[in-house]
Each structure stands twice: as C-alpha cells, then as structure tokens.
Amino acid sequence: MNKLVIPGDVVAKGNFRSWSNVFKKGEEYFSMFVGRAEVGGGRLRVIRLTGPYIPKIGDFVIGVVTDVQPLAATLDINSYVNGFIMANAFFKRRIDPSRYDLSKKVNLGDLVAAKVQRIERGKDVFLQPDQKWKVEGDAVFYISPAKAHYIYTSRSRIPSKIKELTGAEIRFGVNGVVVVKGDLKKIEMVKKALDVIELKYDLNGLYNEIIKVFGKDGKSTDS
Amino acid sequence: MENQLIVNGKRTDGRSPTELRPLKIDVGIIKNAAGSSYIEHGKNKIIVAIYGPRDSHRYGINIERATLRCRYHMSPFSTEERKNPQPSRREIEISKVIRDALEPSLILENFPKTTIDVFVEVLQSDGGSRSASITAASVALADAGIPMKDLVEAVAVGKVDGTLVLDLNDIEDKKGESDMPVAFMLNENKITLLQMDGKMTVEEFKAGLMMAMEAAKKIKEIQKEALTRKYSSGERKNDA
C-alpha cells in the first residue's frame, strides 16, 4: 500500500507498533502531511513529499560554513535551523582556543560533511564531523529535503545507481545537498538525474525513471 | 423590484441561494516560496505564498513553537477604484483573522523559535475575500509541508432580502442584511472563525451554519483535488 494522503486524511485504523508523520485520534490515524502512506508489519508511516529538512539524530548532512568563531563553526544545513560543530570535534580532543585557531581548519563557504549528534531545546543542532568531513566538488545541487530524506532512509538504490551511471564522485546529504565532483559532462548527467527526483512525485517509480533518463546502455538521453 | 437582490429565487449572478460561486485552486505556483496556491472564487483572484519556517531572533518570539505571521494585502488594482497600497485598518484586521483561523489546524510545536510567514495578495476582489484567502492559505501551508491536523475551509453565509444565502458576492455583501464568514476544520468538527455583520435570528443562525458546513465539505473536496493534482504522480507543472 502506497497511497497519496493529504493532511487530515485517515491513513489507517487499528493498532500499530510504530508510526510517524501521523497523529492518532481514537482508533484512527490521520496524516499530518502531504505524502505517501506505507502500512505494513505493524508499522505505519507517511513519507513526506514536501517540507523543510527536519534534523534527526544520526542524519548524515552536508552544510556550508557560514560563521567561524574560536569555539565553534556555524553551518547552513538547508533547514530552518543552523548546525554547530564545536572546535573540539574538528581537533578530535579538547583544545585551548587561545592556542588553536579553528579558522585554519574551516573557513566561510567550506562544505562540511557531518552527522547530527544531538539536538538541544528543539533547535540547537550539534554536529559531529565525518571522517572525511571536507567536501570538495565542482557543483552543488539542492533537492527537496523531504524526498532526499526518503531516498536515504529507505535503503534506496538511487544514490548508488546515479554514481554508477554517471561515473561522477558524488556525496549526498540527507538534508538535500548534493555535491558533485567531475567534468562538465558528468555534472550535467547528475543534474538530469536529480531533476527527475525533483520533478516526480511517484516515489515508487523514481528508480526506473532515473534509469530511463540514461537509456538502456547507461548513456544520457535527451528524453 | 429594482432594489431587490433576489428575483424569482435567483440572485444577481444567477445562482440559487444555496449555490457556491465557481471555485478553482492551483497549488505550487510560486517557485521561490516554500508553498503557494492560487484561488479563483467567483471574481476573487488571490495568491498565497508561504515562507518558512525560518530562524527567528526577534524579541518576544515564542520559544515553545513557531510563530505564525500573516499579511493580507489588496493590490491597488484589485478594486474598481484604485486602492491605496498602504495597509488599511480592514487589511490589518483580516490579517489577524486569517492567522487566528489557520493557527488551530497547525502543529507549530515542531518548529520552536521560528517564524512562518503567510502572504496573501488579493489581485481581484469580490465579496468573501477573507474566506477565499483562508481556503487558499490552508492549501498553501499543506504545500509548504507544515504539519497540520486538517485543512481549513471557509465560506460566508448571509441574509439578503430576508433569505439565507450562501457565499455572498460583493453586492450582496454590501447591500445584504447580514454576512457571516465561517471557517471549519471538518475532521476535528471545529469552527476556527465565526464573524457576523448585521442581524440574524437564532433559527437563521443555525440554518446558516448548517448551510456553510455543507458548502465547506464541497470546498474541502476541491482543496484535496488541487493537492492531489500536484502530488499524484506526474511532474510539477505550475512553476512560475
């Protein structure tokens, strides 16, 4: 079952072990978002099709450094909140800010890959830099955070397939940030694939739609 | 006879007393906005754009949940005579009314210390622009991915020539005996807006409310159809 629901629609009735993006009233579960409902195995969830990136602990995100202070760097993580990385996390030990200069590690505009470590007061998002935290690329794309979240949390084959078909070096963030490294042709191919994700709302058919763009031989077509 | 607004059971625009004006909603018309909608309700033409949730550092911001802000504005060309673009007392009041009508449907606790902006721009005005704005704004909020319990739909009922009528147009609004805009959250069985100009008896009020509720069900179907059209499976079509 994978039907389109809008806010206020009854998604299911009965008892479920877990549910997300729905609210319960009596025996019924109502959708809170425009999305696709998935019911099965005692689980119920509505996959959002639209909306901002809502950080969750453990999410792998890519952010742009917007501010560097002695004790922390602030990142734009394509959300309604900023992400913070403490200087200690970059140096991997407790540091004395008078002796260590964080701006030697990161600068404004740098792309940083990190994991959401903790969220305080519902809004302050603290990140832990990835082992390969410095993200270098030739192009940065933004896709709908709601769909990006679905693609990465559903064990979808889409990211690996795009890498395979384009041959480009790509890093995907759950927050919808995609960084591509490669020549212009590869970047254009990746853009085509991302356009499919952005423009199609039928999540079940996304994988096949992307394959279609590249044709049977994996080469880009103009269709 | 000349001054009558209902002749042989028909109103000035040919509708019966319980008939809605033609209603059309499009979703996602403004690419820069988080969510948007366009509504044509009779001669009303209104665009709604949602921006946010956005990080807010404003003094007095709610630390428990998002703050909903609403700006209702009539374009200078929306009326027959030029309208001063400066916000009027009426526009400020309607902005507040729209915000209060939408707020109960939203789950704002998910976005503490942020702001969600609702911009309502009336391009062409007829009677009932506040109701149309609420209907369109609710769809735009769903398009923006703001969590909500239910869509909100609004419609006005009133009394013209001693007859209860649904969805008043401009002339009926001005010359009628009373006007009562109502907004509903049908799933929750709640009324989020109820205003009234003029006078009605208790019986008329009850009958009017039932009439508005029946109309709200039809409006909800149109809202759902508009959202379904965008998100069903096809490509995004209405990008500006």
Image (cartoon, coloured by chain):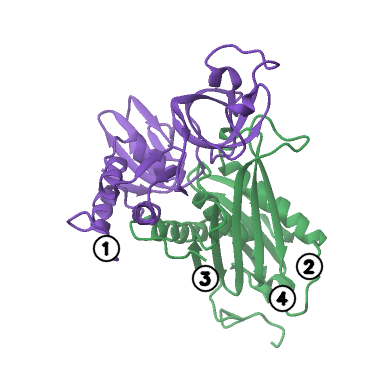
Chain colours: A purple, B green
User: Judging from the image, what secondary structure is the residue with disc 3 in?
Assistant: loop
Residue B161 visible in the shown view? no
Where B76 falls versus A81 (above or below)?
Answer: below
In this rendering, position of residue A85 left or right of residue A175: right
Residue B136 visible in the shown view? yes
Q: Identify the disc placed on residue B19.
A: 3
CB contact under 8 Å: marks 3 and 1: no
User: Judging from the image, what secondary structure is the residue with disc 4 in?
Assistant: loop
Which residue appears at 42% of the width and 65% of the height? B237
Query: What is the spatial separation of the Cα atoms under label 4 and label 1, in whole angstroms?
Result: 47 Å
- Expressed as whole percent of the image width and height from the top left, the position of residue A218 reads 21, 54
Query: What is the spatial separation of the Cα atoms under label 4 and label 3, in whole angstroms?
Result: 28 Å
Which residue appears at 36% of the width and 36% of the height? A152
- Badge 2 and badge 4 in a common chain: yes
- Expressed as whole percent of the image width and height from the top left, the position of residue B44 reads 61, 71
**Front of the two marks 4 and 3:** 4
Q: Which residue is mark 1?
A: A221
Chain to which the residue tagged by mark 4 belongs: B
Residue lying at the far bottom in this picture: please name it: B2
Q: Identify the disc placed on residue A89.
A: none
- Expressed as whole percent of the image width and height from the top left, the position of residue A194 reads 38, 52
Under mark 1, the amino acid is Thr
Tell me which corner region of the image, top left, top right, bottom left or bottom right, holds residue A146: top left
N-term mark: 2 or 4: 4
Q: Which residue is mark 2?
A: B85
Which residue appears at 79% of the width and 61% of the height? B87
Q: Which residue is mark 4?
A: B77
CB contact under 8 Å: marks 2 and 3: no
